[in-house]
Image (cartoon, rainbow, N blue to C red):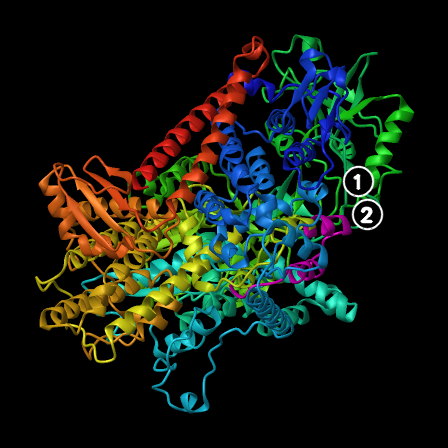
Amino acid sequence: MSSQLASCVSPPEMATLYASPHPDDFRSLLPLIAAEYSPSSRPRIVTEDPPASLNARSRPTLVLGSGGADSVLSGSNAVAWYLACQGRRAGVDAKQQSQVWQWLSFADNELTPVACLQQSSRVELMRVLKVLDQSLAPRTYLVGESITLADMAVATAVLLPFKYVRPSDRKTLTNVTRWFTTCINQPQFLKVLGEIALCEKMVPVTPKTNAAANAKAGSGGPPKTEAQLKKEAKKREKLEKFQQKKEMEAKKKSQAPTEVVKYVCSVKQKKKKSIFKDVVSPLPDSYSPQYVEAAWYPWWEKQGFFKPEYGRRSISDQNPRGIFMMCIPPPNVTGSLHLGHALTNAIQDSLTRWHRMRGETTLWNPGCDHAGIATQVVVEKKLMRERGQSRHDLGRDSFIQEVWKWKNEKGDRIYHQLKKLGSSLDWDRACFTMDPKLSFAVQEAFIRMHDEGVIYRSKRLVNWSCTLNSAISDIEVDKKELTGRTLLPVPGYKEKVEFGVLVSFAYKVDGSDEEVVVATTRIETMLGDTAVAVHPADARYQHLKGKMVLHPFSDRKMPIVFDDFVDMGFGTGAVKITPAHDHNDYEVGVRHNLAFINILDENGLLINVPPPFLGMKRFEARKAVLQALQDRGQFKEIKDNPMVVPVCSRSKDIVEPLLKPQWYVSCSDMGRQAADAVREGRLKIIPDHHLKTWFNWMDNIRDWCISRQLWWGHRIPAYFITVSDPSVTPGEDMDGHYWVSGRSEEEAREKAAKRFNVSPDKISLRQDEDVLDTWFSSGIFPFSIFGWPNETQDLSVFYPGTLLETGHDILFFWVARMVMMGLKLTGKLPFKEVYLHAVVRDAHGRKMSKSLGNVIDPLDVITGISLEGLHAQLVDSNLDPLEMEKAKQGQKSDYPNGIPECGTDALRFALCAYTSQGRDINLDVNRILGYRHFCNKLWNAVKFAMKSLGDDFVPAEKAQLSGEESVSDRWILSRLSAAVALCDAGFKAYDFPTITTAIYNFWLYELCDVYLESVKPVFSKAEDDAASQRQALVCRQTLYTCLEVGLRLLSPVMPFVTEELYQRLPRRQQSDPPSICVTSYPETAEFCWSSEEADRDMDFIMTVVKTIRSLRADYNLTKTRADCYLQCVDTATASLVQKYSLQIQTLSYSQAVIPLTAGQPVPEGCAVAIASDRCTVNLMLKGLIDVEKEVAKLMTKESDLEKQMEKLREKMVKNDYKEKVPVKVQEQDAEKLRQSQTELEKVKEAVENFRKMM
C-alpha cells in the first residue's frame, strides 16, 4: 500500500486517453470522469482504438509520455486509479485507499453482472442495490466526506440499470437515489454524462404485428388456430386500453398539483376553548408535516405548559425534583435562522422538555440582542435606499427613533421562526437587551465596575472599521488568508486593492553611507515609522548601536533599537516600527519609549504626514509611497507573500489597528477567578476537550475594550468633567480622574463636585458619545433578565441557572464574559454546567457561506423549496455576479431537485442524531429526509396498533406485568426498558446520538419490524376461544404500553408528531396530564423489565428468521409459503425453537416450522443454510419451484463462472504478471478468484440439492 500511496502523489505526466465514445460504455465513462477530477493533469482524449504498436488490449487505454513499454495502462480500473490519484480522489490514506478498492471490486463483481442482465433479473438487481442502500444510510459518499473513485466506479456501473429502475423501487432505495442524484449532478459528471433523466413511469410494451412477423412465425411452427388468434387479439386490446388509462392518469397527475394533507381549524373549534385540535376524526392515510404541526404550538402556549408556574401555586415553593433554568443565547434582532440556530434550539428544547417532563420547575428564558453594529448598518442602508439620507442627516435622537421603529416592525421575525421549530420558551419572560429593565442593569454594572476601578479609560490600539467609523470586537474580524498577490474589493474604492505582497525598501543611516533594508506588507504605514528594530544578538547590526536612520519624507531621525521580539532569520533581520498602527510595534514602542505618530483619521485619510501624502486615502497613499521610494532610489523589491488580511465582517472593510481613547475592563483578576472555578470543579465544561482552550484564554487574558463609536446601543453612563475654578487644572481626555459615572447627570455632578471639592454649580459635564460593546450587555444577560440589581422573585429562584448550552465558537466572547461578570457583580457563577455543541458545516465539511450557496434556512428544510426558489434567495443577497454563479452551481450540485419537505420533527431529530461531542458536524440536508420516512413509519405503526387495540380498549391504570405475557411480550418490554435506560443515560450525559439511536431502533427495528408482525396472528385469532381472548387482551396491554411509553421517550426530540399521536390514545386515568409535553418522562425505576434471557433468545430466533428469509429470496419465493425444518444441535435449542415457533413462522412467512434434533433426518428436496452453530435451516422447495428450470439457470451460471476463472488464471500465470501488474491489482485479481471459487461452490451445492428433488 505504501508504494501505491506514493503513486498518488507523483507528478503528473503528459498523457493520452483512448476511450470509447459510446454513452453507455461505463468502462470508458469511469476514466473519463476520473480525468475531470484531475484538471491539472487531464489527458488528451482520443475516441479511436489505440495504435497496434502499443499492444493495448482494448479501450480504455492511457498512454503516459512517450508510450514506452512501462508507460501504457489498459483497463478501466487501472486507468481510472492512476487518474484518480492525480486528482487526489483515490483516498487520503491507506485505510481509505483500501475502502476504494473494495468498492471497485463491488462494482466489478456484484453490480456489473446484474446490470448487464435483462429485466428478469430485477430481483437480483434490487438485492444488490439494497446492499448499496444500507451502506449509504449513515454517509453522504461511499468513502470519506467527498467524491472518490469509489463513487465514480459504482455510479457508472449502476448508471444504465438505475435509469430504468421503477419509480416505486427508487422510493425504497432512498439512500441510493440521494447519492446517485448527488453524483450525476456534480459538474465533472455532467461534463461527461450530460443531463441524466430517470424513468418516471413504467409503460407496458405493446407488441407490433406485421406480415413479415406472421410469416416468420408460420415458418417456425404450426399455424395458430382461430381461437388462439382471437385470444391474442383480445389480449392486445386489453393491453392498449391499459396503456391509454395509464397515459390519462399520468396526464391528470401532471396537470393537478400534488395534494398536501393540511389541517384546517373549523369555526366551531375556534369558538370552543376546550377543543384545541380535532383528534377524533381518523388519522390521514400518511404522515404530513403540515397536518401534524398545525395548531399544537398555540395551544401549548395558551395552556401555559412552557411556564415554570404550570402545575404549581408558586415558583418559590420547594420542588423535590429540583429546578432547571437555562437562558437562550440571544440571537441578533437583525438575524434570521440558519442551521446553526436550528441545532442550538433542537438541543436546548430537547433538554428543556426532558427536564420539564421529569417534574422539575423548568424555565427556558427567551431573549434577543440589540446587535449594535448589525442593526445600525441595516437601518442606515434602509434610510439611504428609501430617503437618500444618512444618520448624520437625521441626528442621533431621530436616528435612534428610526431604529426602534424598524425593531418594532421587523424585530420579532426570529421569534416566529423559533416557534416554528417548536421551541418551548416562556414567551412572557422574553427580554430585549435594550428594554428598560436590561438597560438599567447595564448602566448599574458599568457604574459599579467603574467606581471600583475595574473599568478604566486608556488610549490603545483597537480594531477600527473606517466604513463604520467604530472600533469592532475580535469576533467581528474575519481572517482572510491569502497565498500571495491578491486584488481585493474595499468599500470606497473603485478599483480593487493589492494585498499579499512584501515590499522591501532602505532607510539611510544618519552620518554614513550605510543603509538598513526593511520590509512591510503595508507600505503606506512607513509614514508613521518611528524606529527600526534588530535583535540584540544579531552580529550584523552591533556596530549600529546608538545610531539613527533618516526618514526619506520628513526630517525625522529614528533610533535603531535592539529588541528580542525580532526574528533574525526573517528577511534582513531588521524591522520597521510603527507603534501607532501595529500591535507588535505598539509593545516595542512602549518598551523603548518611542514616539506614537497616528497617520490615519477615523475615515482612513492620512494625517500628520508631509505633502503630497496629506489627506490621501490610505490605499491611494500605498501606491504613492511606493512610487516616491522608487523615485528616491530607496525601493528594493516586491514579492508575493502569504498573509492574513483582517476584514470587517459587517462592512467588508479592511480593519486598521488605530490608537483611540476607549473604555476598558481589567480582566486579569476576573479571568483568574473564572479559570479557578473550572479547575476547582465548581463550573463544568462539556466536552472536556475545550478545557485547554478555556485555560489558555483565561490564563493569558487581555483587558477588554468595551467602547463602540455607534449611536445604537447602551450609551456609556460616563461624563467628562470640566471645573470652572482656576484652582483646578483642566483635564485631559485620557486622564481617568476627570471622568465620572452616574445613573443620572445630577448624580454624576454630585460625585464630581465631591471629588474636586467644589460646589456642584462649578461642574460642567459632557457625556461620552460612545455606546457599550454588545457583548457587555450579553455578559450580564443571565441575571439582568431577572431584574438585577433589584432583588426579584425570579432572581432568587432562577439565578444561578443550571446550564448554558451554545456553540464552542463563542466560548470566549460570550461564555467567559458571563462567568467573569457573574462572579464580579453577583458573587455567584451564572450556571453550573456549560455544554458546547459542534459547529454545523455542509455535507462536504465546508463552512456555511453565502458565496458557496450552502447556507440553508431551516424553514426551507421544514417546508421544502425548489432549486429555483434557492436560486431566487441568492438574488436578495449582496453577492457579486461571479460569486452568485458559483453559489448557484453549488446549490445545483447539492440540491439538484431542491429540498423536499421534511417537517420540523425530522429536522430536529436529524440535528440531534448528528450531534457528537466534537468540533464539527457535516450535515447532509438530504439525509434529513430519511427521518421524515421514520415519522411516516411511526404514523403507520400507531394507526395499525390503534386498529388492533379497538374502540373499546381500556388500558390498565398502571404499566405493570401481569405474569401472563407471551415470549414476544416479554421480549418487547425488555427492549422498551433498555430504550428507557439508554435515553435516561443519554440525556444526563448530553449524548444525543445515543438517545436518537435508542428511540429509532426501538420503534423501527424492534416494535415495527418484529413485535407488530409477530402478534398479528394473536389478534386474528382473538375470538377463537377464551384462552385466545385472554392472550389478545394481554398483548393489547403490552402494545399500549409500548406505544404510550415510546411516544413519551420521543416527545422531547419530536414534539409535534408525538403530541398528535398521543392525543389519539386512550388515557390510563382521567387525571392524566392533558399534553404529552407535561407527562412524566419514562424512568428506569418504573420500567425495569430488562431480561437478558429474553433478549438472548430473541437474538437467536431473529438470526434463524433472517436465514430463512435469505433462502426464500435466493429461490425467489416471494408469495409461496414453504415448510421449514430447523435442525438443532441439542434438545435445549429444539425446545427454544418450539417455544418461538409461532414467531418464526410469522416473521419468516413459513408454512410450518418443524424443529428437529441432531438424530432426526431431514426430508429430501430442501435448500440448506446455516443460521448458527446451534441451528441449520432446511427449506422445503420440492413441488414449489420448477427444478429443471432452476438447474438449467444454475448450470449456465456455473459455466460462466468457470470461464471467468479460467481467463483470470491465464492472466495470473503469465511470466511477466508479477513484475508488470501493480501489487494492488494482483491483490484484486486474487480476491476476485477467491470470490468466484466460493460462488462456484455454492452453485454446485445448489445444483446437487436440486438434483436430489428430481
Nearest to the observer: residue 735 or residue 913 = 913
Relative horizontal placement of residue 1005, taking residue 728 as reference (left or right) = left
Nearest to the observer: residue 518 or residue 1109 = 1109
Query: Is 873 a magenta residue?
Result: yes
Query: Is 349 a magenta residue?
Result: no
Q: Position of residue 903 (x, y in %)?
A: 48, 64
Q: Is residue 326 above or below residue 511?
A: below
Judged from the image, the secondary structure of the residue bearing numbered disc 2 is loop
| Dot 1 and dot 2 residues touching (CB under 8 Å) | yes
Q: Please give the range of residues in magenta.
A: 862-888
Nearest to the observer: residue 257 or residue 1249 = 1249
Task: Give, as a three-letter code, the residue at label 2.
Answer: Tyr
- Farthest residue, direction right: 631
Displayed quadrant of residue 293: bottom left
Q: Is residue 625 above or below residue 1099?
A: above
Task: Give, as a three-letter code, the residue at label 1.
Answer: Val
Displayed quadrant of residue 371: bottom right
Q: Is residue 5 above or below residue 393?
A: above
Mark 2 — residue?
493
Give neighbour class at mark 2: few <14, some 14-19, many 20+ (Cα, 10 Å).
Answer: few
Relative horizontal placement of residue 889, taking residue 981 as reference (left or right) = right
Relative horizontal placement of residue 9, taking residue 827 as reference (left or right) = right
Task: Kindly report the distance in space between the C-alpha atoms of the residues bearing marks 1 and 2.
Answer: 8 Å
Q: Position of residue 787 (x, y in %)?
A: 39, 67
Q: Name the residue at 60% across, 44% down.
A: 159
Judged from the image, the secondary structure of the residue bearing numbered disc 1 is strand
Residue 497 badge = 1
